[in-house]
Image (cartoon, grey):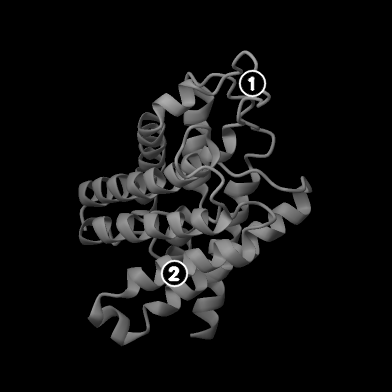
Amino acid sequence: MSNGDIFVGETIGTAILILFGAGVCAAVTLRYSKARASGWVVIAFGWGFGVLAGAYTAAPLSGGHLNPAVTIGIAVDTGKWGKVWVYLLGQIVGAMLGAVLAYLVYLAQFQANVNKEGSPEEPTPTLGIFSTIPEIRNPIANLITEIIATIALVLPVLAFGLTKGLGESGTTVLIVSLLVVGIGLSLGGPTGYAINPARDLGPRIVHTFLPIPNKGTSDWGYSWIPVVGPLIGGALAGLIYNAAF
């Protein structure tokens, strides 16, 4: 794979992932959305379908990593680091692009995110549409959650590569998307399961600059956890896989 193919594939694939993921969060969160308050299960499946669409789209060009933790895990296992920077660059650019696209889809809802005279509702906080927010702010606990949840993603992803039938049938990406849904349902409660540094950092950057009424803080004090935790988890998964398989 050339550097150009990798960059284009990861950019497009990650943009699709974030368009679906931020889109479902916006759908569930914002006032005047037909899916408002439809719940955590809807969010988990929305992100899973985002992985499905993004990874299948990117796979012919880049292999469809869409996640620096996956890229790091593969590099730790194989020892091949030469193209890691291209993957990471495409993933960050794609995540930012996907966040902008999700914003444009829900532009009218974001613009309506204001107090209306006589309305008892406060403006909807918007950061959670783009990036993760811990339910209980405890840096050590939050970091541990992200590390474990990312190992639960990357280690199976690496192991799926050994399952010959999955590769031959072309269903590996489908299984990974269901894995992401499962992680969201089982491990997403404490931190919102970033498990992907680009997925959190790119949209957080976009949130900082978007002209969203009453958007609130972008919470940069917390932002290192959904970056560092998944990177550690991805590296540990690569080490475990290399030692055990």
Judging depth in this view, the residue of 16 and 201 nearest the camera is 16
Residue 215 seen in the figure: yes
Local packing at callout 2 (Cα closer than 10 Å; few below 14, some 14-19, many 20+) is some
The Cα atoms of the two marked residues, 1 and 2, are separated by: 40 Å
Task: Give percent across and percent down for residue 220.
Answer: 64, 32
Left or right relative to 50: residue 128: right
Residue 176, quarter of the rendered image? bottom left
> Which numbered mark, 1 or 2, is in the foreground of this view?
1
Which numbered disc flags the more N-terminal residue, 1 or 2? 1
- Assign a secondary structure to mark 2: helix
Look at the image and tell me whether residue 210 can be seen: no
Which amino acid does the dot numbered 2 rest on? Leu
- The structure residue drawn at horizontal position 35% and vertical position 34%, both measured from the top left corner, is 101
State the quadrant of the N terminus: bottom left
Q: Position of residue 171 (x, y in %)?
A: 30, 75
Q: Which residue is mark 1?
A: 119
x 48%, y 37%: residue: 203
Q: Which mark is residue 178?
A: 2
Q: Position of residue 122 (x, y in %)?
A: 66, 25
Disc 1 packing (10 Å; few <14; some 14–19; many ≥20):
few
User: 177 and 73: which one is in front?
Assistant: 177
The residue drawn where x is 39% and y is 32% is 100
Of all residues, the one furthest to the top in this rendering is: 117
**Is residue 44 shown above or below 79?**
above
